[in-house]
Amino acid sequence: MTGTFAFPRNAFLGFDHIFDQLDNIHLHAKDTYPPHNVVKEGEMKYTLEMAVAGFTKEHIDIEVKDHILTIKGDRPARREQSKYVHKGISARNWNKSFRLSEYTEVTGADLTDGILTVGLEVVLPEEKRPRKISITKHEELTNDHSRTKKLKSAEPA
């Protein structure tokens, strides 16, 4: 589904993966089955809740690859369609994908009472975490003594 957006794709080189992801998001934007919630549990923790009535853990496959969380539901047909007087519970197979940020990890999954729960946590590497900077004298910041001497000599006497 190339060319969905209002900017010329051929003007951007090396961004194919981003355009492909945007096309995929646009293609599946109205796909609401199965319904799901995203709950923020803490500053860096989230829970994905998905309503999967009629599916057991044997029918569900969860995979993370290249920062894409993919959850698939695949179960065999249980009854003949002609036996239903009313069929309001969908039993179709499904495939749902979620783009995860660079540092988001899946911490586990559980299936209870028809709700699939997937734990997510943002785990920043040490160099990406906020750190406190202490206030010190300028001379202590550099080992380049010639720069320190130049700064001192530039001060008015």
Image (cartoon, rainbow, N blue to C red):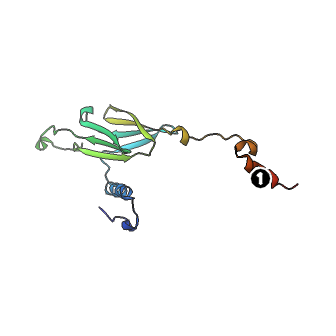
> Of residues 127 and 96, which is closer to you in this image?
127
Q: Residue furthest front?
A: 146
Residue wearing tag 1: 150
Q: Residue 34: x and y, percent? A: 30, 45
Q: Looking at the figure, which quarter contains the N terminus?
A: bottom left
Q: Looking at the figure, which quarter contains the C terminus?
A: bottom right
Q: Is residue 8 left or right of residue 76?
A: right
User: Residue, x 11% and y 44% (percent of image)?
Assistant: 82
> Of residues 82 and 60, which is closer to you in this image?
60
Secondary element at image label 1: helix
Q: Quadrant of residue 65?
A: top left
Q: Quadrant of residue 114?
A: top left
Would residue 54 be seen by someone viewing this image from the given angle?
no
Would residue 106 be seen by someone viewing this image from the given angle?
yes
User: Residue, x 70% and y 43% (percent of image)?
Assistant: 143
Is 112 situated above or below 81? above
Crowd tier of the residue under label 1, counting other residues whose Cα lies within 10 Å: few below 14, some 14–19, many 20 or above: few
Q: Is residue 26 left or right of residue 43?
A: left
Q: Residue furthest right?
A: 157
Q: Amino acid at mark 1?
A: Lys
> Of residues 31 and 156, which is closer to you in this image?
156
Q: Is residue 136 left or right of residue 91?
A: right
Q: Residue 130: x and y, percent? A: 59, 41
Q: Is residue 64 left or right of residue 43?
A: left
Q: Residue 134: x and y, percent? A: 70, 40
Q: Residue 53: x and y, percent? A: 28, 37
How many numbered marks are there? 1
